[in-house]
Amino acid sequence: MHEQKKTVAFIGLGAMGYPMAGHLLAAGFKVSGFDLSGEARSRFAANGGNASSEVSTALWNADFVITMLPNGKIVRDVLLKNENWRSLKKGCLAIDMSSSAPSDTQELAKELVAKDTRLIDAPVSGGTKRAISRSLTIMVGGESSDIDDSMPLLESMGTQIFRTGPIGSGHAMKAINNYVSGAGVVATLEGVLLAQKFGLEAEAVVEILNASSGKNNASDVKMKQFVLSGTFDSGFAAGLMAKDIRIAAELANSLDMRLSGLNATAAIWEAAAQELGPGSDHTLIAKYLENR
């Protein structure tokens, strides 16, 4: 295919980015990757990718630029920093797959116009496991023609791709999804703690929840696997969950909405991330809630 001869710059080769970039390689794209970690760059090179020690080198002459980074501020710096800006190919398509604030994404799109660089936001859901299995859910915001151009890449990394609307809408949807997910984690853990205090067995509580109307993502794929097992290694950090839910809360505030459940959930996750450490696995919030 013609699209598979295109060059992709992949910025951010961490737990999610590394397998995602690997799928692009497997699909026949030429991928130049960058990560601050030398170990991550070496691993990518060993997998057949072209690892660059500088962002500007990875960006040079790329038809597509994919960012998989901690937040939108870092994405902006990567794309607009002088030497990186000069390396951007005129007319290239930037795809921000990070979890960024919608307003930041909208502003970045306006700034990139000066370089004739197009931007779409395409955050993902599914975690490391689904990044590896190429089964991510991808929420895409931007111009329809730009999304059309990105589809061969997105289809190489995910199985469910949703067009959410204009630029920034993908990031809004991701933040809303993580709010609902994070609220479900808190509700499930508090429910189990309440049940245990009354004298019920945690394992039985989770089984009953999963056979009843209380079933949710946390009860189904997190409680027995990461909490009750004591492994706490789901692969998603508490700090990232707190950040995403705060993005949703700030979005609500910017729209003059008073969503008390959202604000309360954001506060709980921020306090937990601060106490546990932002890099701790998000399922460790079980310890935080238990000790409150």
Image (cartoon, rainbow, N blue to C red):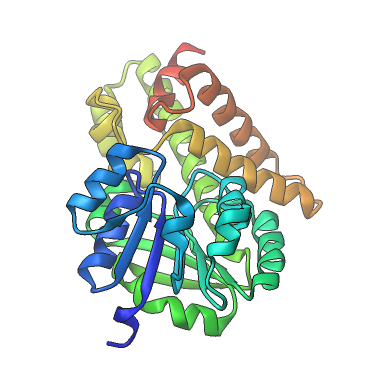
What residue do we see at 52% from left, 13% from top?
Answer: 292
* Image-based side of 292 in relation to 133, left or right: right
Outermost residue, right side: 256
What residue do we see at 37% from left, 46% from top?
Answer: 217
Viewer-side residue, 63 vs 211: 63
Residue 128: x and y, percent? 30, 47
* Image-based side of 118 in relation to 218, left or right: right
| Image quadrant where residue 172 sits | bottom right
What residue do we see at 70% from left, 71% from top?
Answer: 114
Residue 24: x and y, percent? 29, 66
Is residue 216 at all visible to an observer of this figure? no
Viewer-side residue, 6 vs 278: 6
In this rendering, the answer to whether 212 lies above or below 37 is below
Viewer-side residue, 112 vs 237: 112
What residue do we see at 58% from left, 28% from top?
Answer: 270
| Image quadrant where residue 283 sits | top left
Number of numbered discs: 0
* Image-based side of 194 in relation to 77, left or right: left
In this rendering, the answer to whether 135 lies above or below 254 is below
* Image-based side of 117 in relation to 154, left or right: right
In this rendering, the answer to whether 287 lies above or below 85 is above
Residue 277: x and y, percent? 47, 21
Residue 121: x and y, percent? 54, 64
Quarter occupied by the N terminus: bottom left
Outermost residue, bottom side: 2
Is residue 279 at all visible to an observer of this figure? yes
